[in-house]
Amino acid sequence: MAGLKILHVAPHLRQGGAERLLFELATHPSDGVTHHVALMQDEVFFDRAGLSVEDLGFDLTRRFGALTHLPASRRGLRALIERLKPDVVQGWLYYGAFLSLAVAARARLVWSIHNTTFPRLLANPQLHLVDRVLAARSRAVPDAIVYCAASARAFHEAHGYAPERGLVIDNGVDLTRFRADAERRATRRAALGLSDDAFAVLLSARNDPQKDLPNCLDAFALFRREAPEARLLLAGRGMDDSDAGLRAMIAARGLGPVVLSLGAVADMPGLLDAADAVLLGSRYGEAMPMALLEALAMGKPIAATRVGDVGRLPCPPEALAPPADPQALAAALTFSSVGDPRWTTSFAEARAQYGLGTMTRAYEALYRSLAEQRRAP
């Protein structure tokens, strides 16, 4: 079969789990496969060197004002389709899928969904409106809807998305990058000022209500009663000292001296090497968090809330807690700090099941199947 050309349509490539997946997929193609990325807003956190990026001209900082750019961006996307002639267009997340509706008749179309539950309607009415449009169009427009977790598929199909279009492709981690390195660990811990006896807990997430930072900070404060040498590393968008609300939350719990707010960090393998465990206390919305998959691939125990498909992860059940229960999350963190021997099996199973190669092959098999249907007489 001739080479495959894939065009991805996404809101942006800021730091985030779905965004990293798109970046990895676009920069690790098999022979004969090329990827192009059209971004509603040209914001790229990752290395651009291996990317072909087109800017569709949105300003996503203006939630409703951004809609004024929609007609011109639809025209720009159609022109891009005519120029590139992709075999498959993949719309990422709700806004990327929504914009891809403009080119549904011009190429095979895939939507890519990476969350489960939503924030409240009043918190983001535009997102709820876009979701309802996609649900209504899902039976006629996309050739496939890819979910990154079974829980995401079940949630969306219960809310009107076409079940006959849905399939699950698990997230994948680049196992060549996310591999423990003792020398790198020593270097990064020294740079962060972590002593040899400090038990470093990493919370890698954006500063957002979905991630429930109060729950995470309460759990860590409880954990420190048993492990006073513990330190908390905060990494992600909005996780820096410039955020007054974050500073106030940390100070209110007396955690100021033991929390490092690092902001967005590009070298996640290095930061994971410096950590001893990974914490994620999300309240809603998660499907299969990349932060947890990367931790397990690096051989780091996790303590997390049981949201989305987190309960499917190959880890001891004691490491998981219900959402919004800081005592239970603190107990999970305590468990993950004691070196239970079952973690060895967990790490091996995670690397075997959630590798980038497995994910890439599954996506490319889907692309080839759709392209064959398009080219058939």
Image (spheres, grey):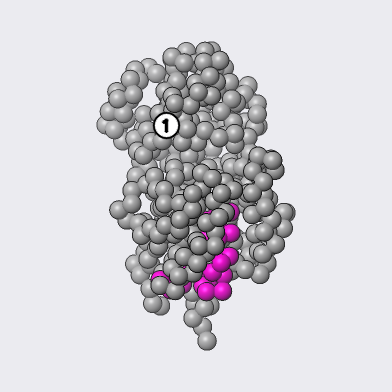
Residue in the image at 66% along x and 64% along y: 137
Instruction: Identify the secondary structure beneath mark 1.
Output: strand
Residue in the image at 62% along x and 68% along y: 141
Instruction: Look at mark 1 in the image and give the residue it sits on.
Output: 263
Task: Give residue 147's position: percent from left, percent from top.
Answer: 58, 55
Task: Give residue 86's position: percent from left, percent from top.
Answer: 44, 71
Q: Is residue 294 magenta?
A: no
Quadrant assignment for the N terminus: bottom left
Question: For the image shown, how many numbered marks are present on the structure?
Answer: 1
Residue in the foreground of this view, choosing between 170 and 61: 61
39 relative to 258, above or below: below
Residue in the foreground of this view, choosing between 132 and 164: 132
270 relative to 165, above or below: above
Task: Give residue 81's position: percent from left, percent from top.
Answer: 46, 70
85 relative to 196, above or below: below
Asked whether the viewer can see residue 285, the reply is: yes
**Image side of residue 184 versus residue 129, left or right:** left
Q: Is residue 94 magenta?
A: yes
Task: Give residue 160's position: percent from left, percent from top.
Answer: 72, 58
Asked whether the viewer can see residue 224, the reply is: no
Identity of the residue furthest to the bottom in this view: 377
* Magenta highlight range: 84-108
